[in-house]
Image (cartoon, rainbow, N blue to C red):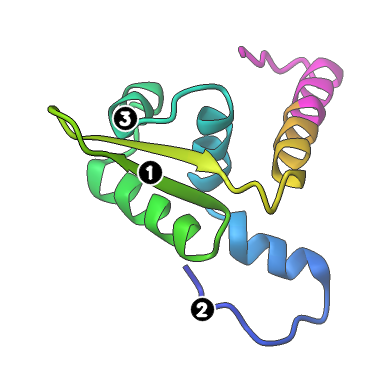
Amino acid sequence: MAKLKREYTCSLLLTMDLVGGKWKLLILWHIMHGDNRFSLLQKGIPDITEKMLTTQLREMELTGLIYRTVICEKPLNVHYAISEQYPQLNILVDSLCDFSKLYGEKNNIIVND
């Protein structure tokens, strides 16, 4: 992740630094839809490596977009959730999904959700 700047000339540039890249929006979508454990995220996103998933989760945790809860039982469980500070993330991800479906319809692209 690019280090966040102290000032941005456009709000979209900050958004791109926060959720840009190949995996972050997909990870957020899975967390929003109940795949909140590491193993479930791995199963839901089969093309992502364990290292990349770990890196992306840590970056989003550091920026405060998600939070991590460790449940101390055997076996140890780690759960991820969207930060309550940023409920707009749900709206952003859902809006992008809606846009993709519409774009797909208009351009004969099959979008399977």
From the image, tell me which residue sits under label 2.
3
- Disc on res. 52: none
Residue drawn at the location 65% of the way across and 46% of the way down: 84
- Disc on res. 69: 1
Name the image quarter holding residue 41. Answer: top left
Give the percent coordinates (x, y) of residue 50: 24, 42
Q: How crowded is mark 3: few (under 14 residues within 10 Å), some or many (20 or more)?
A: some
Marked residue nearer the N-terminal end (2 or 3):
2
Name the image quarter holding residue 17. Answer: bottom right
In the displayed structure, does residue 52 sit left or right of residue 82?
left
74 in relation to 69, above or below: above
Frontmost residue, 52 versus 68: 68
Mark 2 to mark 3 CA distance (whole Å):
26 Å
Does the magenta run of residues contain 109? Answer: yes
Does the magenta run of residues contain 65? Answer: no
| Type of amino acid under label 3 | Gln
- Judging from the image, what secondary structure is the residue with disc 3 in? helix
Quarter of the image with the C terminus is top right
Farthest residue to the left: give it.
74
Give the percent coordinates (x, y) of residue 36: 43, 30
Give the percent coordinates (x, y) of residue 52: 32, 49
Residue drawn at the location 58% of the way across and 78% of the way down: 4
From the image, tell me which residue sits under label 3.
42
Residue drawn at the location 67% of the way across and 87% of the way down: 6
Dot in front, 1 or 2 = 1
Marked residue nearer the N-terminal end (1 or 2):
2
Span highlighted in magenta in the image: 98-113
| Type of amino acid under label 1 | Thr
- Judging from the image, what secondary structure is the residue with disc 1 in? strand
